[in-house]
Image: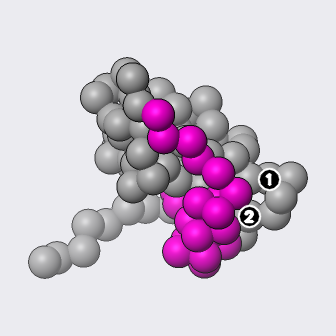
Amino acid sequence: MSTYKFNSKDFYKKKDKQNECCALTGIRLEPHTCDISHVVPLHKGGKHEYDNVQLIHKDLVKIARGLTNDEILEYAIKIVETLGKTKGFTIKRKSK
């Protein structure tokens, strides 16, 4: 079991690194809208360490604690492909 503790020093360091924005949406975080999650959830093999912690909007906590960022992205793409077309949105992969 890990003994790492995410503390206030880590919070401010992560906040600066993320430009005070949600790691998933880019939405600017305020103290009342901010929460943390693991980039790779613990139950999927992620480690409880600084490099695996991200600040996210509190509304996304349930999603982010169960899925990896890549899995969230895949669902977001499917949502835009399904619901987005009724609102005029499409997704196009940028050519490499």
Left or right: 84, with 8 as reference point: left
Question: Tag on residue 14?
Answer: none
What range is drawn magenta here?
Answer: 3-26
Task: Say if mark 1 contacts mark 2, CB within 8 Å.
Answer: yes
Residue at image mark 1: 33
Question: Tag on residue 29?
Answer: 2
Front residue of this view, candidates 93 and 7: 7
What residue type is disc 2 on? Leu
Left or right: 16, with 33 as reference point: left
Rendered view: 89 above or below 19: above
Q: Position of residue 67 (x, y in %)?
A: 42, 33
Dividing the picture into quarters, in which one does residue 95 lie?
Answer: bottom left
Front residue of this view, candidates 70 and 85: 70
What residue type is disc 1 on? Thr
Left or right: 8, with 95 as reference point: right
Q: Position of residue 58 (x, y in %)?
A: 72, 44
Q: Quadrant of the C terminus?
A: bottom left
